Image: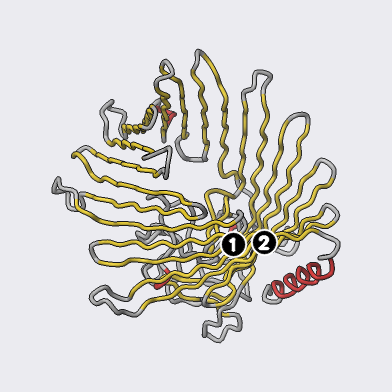
């Protein structure tokens, strides 16, 4: 159904580009990245896995309209395309986005597993990523690209309040290759390991290999009191978390319950089943509260059938010698129980972070960072030393060294960790990176990481802004 939509949309953008280049302002960027991963490290000469990625972004401004296109290419071809229109109508700002992408699977996820991370942190490594698109339904992958979502954001300022409405129309079954983010699952993944995904047809059944579309909405209102306190209220219907594509992510994703499968399929509703609209969550944020030299912020999140979540922060200075900030959080404020407290103390070049993970007023983890500038008057260099400890003692240490000479910037960071809980720190990784920037419009970077097993991944990236 949506197979021909992307070529038509891209054709329109290209026509607009070439027909208005003399009348409108054209800006953009182009990046190309090459990742190399050795097959093994037993010998000096080995084969490498290559992953070449490029990204082209264009913005065409004409008579107050901004036409945008964000294209991502890889070895399999076109991986994603985001086509946007940004404009202003009176007091109303509108951003309309159409998102297309190629479905990919990850060989590291268990077969048939859905809605689980599989224990993977971040995006699945490229050597385990395979194309799953099947546009003609012949059971053979053909690198097909499909329609994934439409995002319509409308913003206006009315009577001093900033009002934003984000409307989402999204394929809730589209497979992703994203696992945990900082140890937490922040989205609702659909992992397909070798199972082809039909990008052409659609149905009303969730968690299968055919697109199923749902609807969501996020309404945000922000304003300030006469004393300067900022209050924000965010209400989401059928939307939460994040949504991931290969090399792209978006705030908010549609809940699978908000599809036609769970609608009322009766003759009383025109054309049969409709998507329901459910209250997902509400967040109330208050920031900029000042009293007695202490500044504080707070946020409360309400989710149906779940305990009320609460986060508050407090910051103050101690006689201009140090700044102190404390973050308190609770996963069940209904029972007046705090779950975590983190205190950060900064004094000059020293930064200390103390964590109490169970509110027993004992330090469960601590991080100390010392940042120094060596030889500041001539050929300065940066030195960063970070020590991490847990309840069993020192758990890791990292040493970073970097300097800038003209357009070149070199950084080297080595990490030592107690990997087997023996009480001894052993070298685990060294990361080397080189960055060159010319006139802020052209940049080049290269990085390599080394471990006791040998060379890890090496990356090179070239970027141009025009």
Q: Quick check: can you spot residue 173?
A: yes
The picture quadrant where one finds residue 107 is: bottom left
Q: Seen in the image, is 397 located left or right of residue 298?
A: left
Q: Position of residue 312 (x, y in %)?
A: 47, 28
Q: Seen in the image, is 398 located left or right of residue 107?
A: left
Instruction: Establish if 160 lies above or below 70.
Output: above
Tag 2: Cα neighbours inside 10 Å, few (<14), some, or many (≥20)?
some
Q: Nearer the viewer, residue 19 or 141?
A: 19
Instruction: Establish if 441 lies above or below 341.
Output: below
Quadrant in which the N terminus is drawn? bottom right
Using the image, tell me which numbered label, if any, was put on residue 273.
2
Q: Position of residue 330 (x, y in %)?
A: 41, 32
Q: Label 1's element? A: helix
Q: Quick check: can you spot residue 339?
A: no
In three-dimensional space, the C-alpha distance between marks 2 and 1, rounded to whole angstroms, equals 8 Å
Q: Residue furthest top?
A: 292
Instruction: Establish if 417 lies above or below 454.
Output: above
Quadrant in which the C terminus is drawn? bottom right
Q: Position of residue 168 (x, y in %)?
A: 65, 54
- Marks 2 & 1, CB-CB < 8 Å contact: yes
Instruction: Establish if 375 lies above or below 179.
Output: above
Tag 1: Cα neighbours inside 10 Å, few (<14), some, or many (≥20)?
many
Q: Position of residue 116 (x, y in %)?
A: 41, 59
Q: Label 2's element? A: loop
Residue depicted at 64% across the width and 22% down the height: 228
Q: Nearer the viewer, residue 209 or 403?
A: 403
For disc 1, the marked residue is: 261
Q: Seen in the image, is 238 located left or right of residue 328?
A: right
The picture quadrant where one finds residue 439 is: bottom right
Using the image, tell me which numbered label, if any, was put on residue 98.
none
Residue depicted at 40% across the width and 20% down the height: 321
């Amino acid at each position: 159904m949506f197979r021909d939509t992307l070529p038509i949309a891209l054709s329109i953008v290209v026509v607009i580009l070439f027909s208005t280049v003399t009348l409108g302002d054209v800006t953009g960027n182009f990046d190309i990245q090459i990742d190399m991963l050795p097959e093994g490290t037993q010998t000096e000469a080995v084969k490498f896995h290559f992953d070449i990625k490029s990204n082209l972004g264009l913005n065409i401004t004409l008579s107050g309209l901004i036409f945008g296109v964000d294209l991502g290419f890889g070895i399999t071809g076109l991986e994603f395309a985001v086509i946007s229109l940004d404009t202003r109508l009176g007091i109303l700002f509108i951003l309309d986005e159409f998102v297309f992408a190629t479905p990919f699977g990850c060989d590291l996820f268990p077969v048939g597993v859905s809605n689980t991370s599989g224990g993977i942190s971040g995006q699945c490594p490229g050597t385990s990523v395979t194309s799953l698109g099947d546009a003609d339904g012949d059971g053979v992958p053909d690198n097909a690209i499909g329609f994934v979502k439409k995002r319509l954001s409308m913003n206006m300022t009315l009577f001093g309040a900033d009002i934003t409405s984000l409307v989402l129309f999204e394929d809730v079954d589209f497979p992703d290759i994203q696992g945990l983010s900082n140890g937490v699952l922040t989205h609702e993944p659909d992992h397909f390991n070798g199972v082809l995904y039909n990008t052409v047809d659609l149905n009303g059944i969730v968690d299968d290999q055919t697109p199923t579309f749902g609807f969501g909405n996020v309404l945000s209102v922000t304003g300030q009191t006469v004393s300067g306190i900022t209050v924000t209220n965010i209400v989401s219907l059928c939307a939460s978390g994040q949504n991931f594509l290969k090399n792209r992510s978006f705030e908010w994703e549609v809940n699978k319950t908000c599809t036609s499968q769970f609608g009322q399929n009766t003759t009383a509703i025109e054309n049969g089943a409709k998507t329901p609209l459910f209250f997902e969550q509400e967040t109330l944020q208050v920031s900029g509260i000042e009293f007695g030299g202490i500044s504080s912020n707070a946020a409360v999140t309400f989710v149906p059938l779940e305990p009320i979540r609460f986060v508050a922060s407090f910051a103050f200075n101690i006689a201009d010698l140090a700044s102190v900030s404390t973050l308190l959080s609770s996963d069940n404020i209904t029972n007046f129980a705090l779950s975590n407290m983190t205190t950060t103390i900064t004094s000059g070049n020293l930064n200390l972070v103390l964590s109490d993970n169970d509110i027993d007023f004992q330090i469960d983890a601590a991080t100390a960072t010392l940042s120094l500038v060596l030889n500041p008057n001539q050929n300065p260099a940066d030195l960063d030393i970070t020590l991490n400890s847990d309840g069993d003692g020192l758990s890791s240490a990292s040493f970073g060294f970097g300097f800038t000479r003209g357009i070149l910037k070199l950084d080297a960071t080595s990490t030592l960790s107690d990997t087997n809980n023996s009480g001894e720190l052993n070298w685990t990784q060294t990361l080397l990176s080189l960055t060159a920037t010319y006139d802020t419009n052209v940049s080049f970077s290269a990085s390599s990481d080394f471990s006791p097993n040998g060379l890890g991944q090496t990356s090179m990236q070239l970027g141009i802004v025009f």
